[in-house]
Image (cartoon, grey):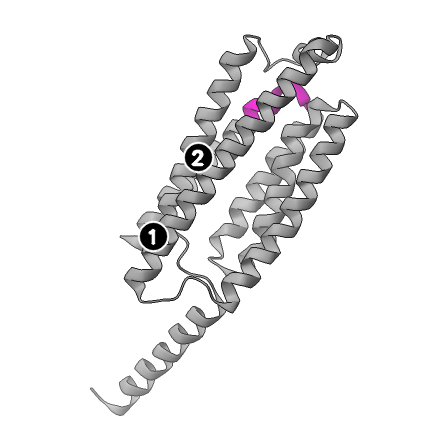
C-alpha cells in the first residue's frame, strides 16, 4: 500500500468516526417493519370494532350525529393507538440496543438524547392538538394530524440519525395533507402511512445497512 492509499484510509476512518459521533446510526430497520405490522393490526382492529364502512366520509357524519358512541369510540381509539405506540417503541428500543451492542456503540449518547428531544417536541405537540380535536369533535382530522406531526418529527430528527428518515417523513406529511382534504379516508391513509410505509422503509433500511 502506497502513502496515498494510507492517507485515503486514514481520511475514511476519520469520516466514519465523525459519522458515528454526530449521528445515531444504531436505529434498526427491523423495528420499522415491526412498527408497520403493529399499525396494520391496530387498523384492522378498528375496522372490525366499528363495523362500518369508515373509509367513506359518511362515517364521520354518523359519529358526530350519535353522541352516545363518541365516548366509547374515543376510548377505543386512544387505547388502540397507545397499544400500537407502546409496542412499536419497546421493539425499537430492544432492536436498536441489540444493534448498538453488535456495533460496539453506546445506546445513550448526547446524539441519541438530541434525537429524542427533536422527535419528542413535534410528537407531544401533535398529541395535545389531537386531544383538542377530540374535545371539539373534529374526528375526521385526527388521523391526518397524526401523520402530519409524525412526519415533522421524522424530518426534525433526521439530522441526528440516518438521512433516509427524512424521506419517510416527507411521505408521511404528504399522506397527512391528502387526508386533511379527504377526511373519509383518514384511517386508510393512516394504515398506509404507519403500516405500509414503515414496512417498506424498514425493509429497505435493513437490506441497505444491516445485511
At mark 1, the secondary structure is: helix
Tell me the residue at 57%/8% (across/down): 52
For the record, the magenta segment spans 182-189
Q: Is residue 77 above or below residue 24?
A: above
x and y, in percent, of residue 140 in the image: 69, 23
Q: Which mark is residue 36?
A: 2
Residue 187 lies in magenta, yes or no? yes
**Which circle's residue, 2 or 1, is located before the other in the chain?**
2
Tell me the residue at 65%/31% (across/down): 144
* Residue 186, picture quadrant: top right
At mark 2, the secondary structure is: helix
What secondary structure is the magenta-colored segment mainly?
Answer: helix
In this rendering, position of residue 36 left or right of residue 149: left
User: Around disc 1, counting alpha carbons within 10 Å, would you say few (fewer than 14), some (14 to 19), or many (20 or more)?
Assistant: few
Do we see residue 205 in this rendering? no
Q: Is residue 125 above or below residue 79?
A: below
Tell me the residue at 60%/44% (across/down): 151
x and y, in percent, of residue 139 in the image: 70, 23
The alpha-carbon separation of the residues under discs 2 and 1 comes to 18 Å
| Residue depth check, mark 2 versus mark 1: number of the one nearer the observer | 2
Q: Which mark is residue 164?
A: none
Q: Which mark is residue 208?
A: 1
Q: Is residue 90 above or below residue 77?
A: below
x and y, in percent, of residue 164 in the image: 47, 52
Locate the N terminus by quadrant: bottom left
Tell me the residue at 60%/28% (across/down): 78
Q: Nearer the viewer, residue 180 or 127?
A: 127
x and y, in percent, of residue 120 in the image: 61, 51
Amino acid at each position: 500500500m502506497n502513502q496515498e492509499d494510507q492517507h485515503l484510509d486514514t481520511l475514511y476512518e476519520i469520516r466514519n468516526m465523525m459519522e458515528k459521533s454526530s449521528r445515531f446510526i444504531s436505529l434498526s430497520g427491523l423495528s420499522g417493519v415491526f412498527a408497520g405490522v403493529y399499525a396494520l393490526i391496530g387498523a384492522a382492529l378498528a375496522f372490525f370494532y366499528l363495523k362500518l364502512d369508515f373509509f367513506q366520509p359518511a362515517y364521520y357524519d354518523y359519529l358526530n350525529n350519535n353522541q352516545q358512541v363518541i365516548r366509547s369510540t374515543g376510548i377505543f381509539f386512544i387505547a388502540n393507538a397507545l397499544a400500537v405506540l407502546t409496542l412499536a417503541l419497546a421493539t425499537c428500543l430492544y432492536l436498536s440496543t441489540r444493534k448498538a451492542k453488535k456495533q460496539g456503540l453506546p445506546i445513550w449518547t448526547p446524539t441519541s438524547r438530541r434525537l429524542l428531544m427533536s422527535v419528542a417536541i413535534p410528537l407531544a405537540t401533535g398529541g395535545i392538538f389531537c386531544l383538542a380535536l377530540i374535545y371539539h369533535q373534529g374526528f375526521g382530522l385526527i388521523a391526518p394530524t397524526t401523520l402530519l406531526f409524525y412526519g415533522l418529527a421524522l424530518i426534525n430528527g433526521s439530522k441526528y440519525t440516518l438521512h433516509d428518515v427524512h424521506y419517510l417523513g416527507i411521505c408521511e406529511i404528504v399522506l397527512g395533507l391528502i387526508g386533511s382534504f379527504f377526511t373519509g379516508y383518514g384511517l386508510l391513509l393512516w394504515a398506509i402511512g404507519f403500516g405500509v410505509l414503515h414496512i417498506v422503509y424498514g425493509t429497505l433500511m435493513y437490506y441497505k445497512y444491516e445485511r
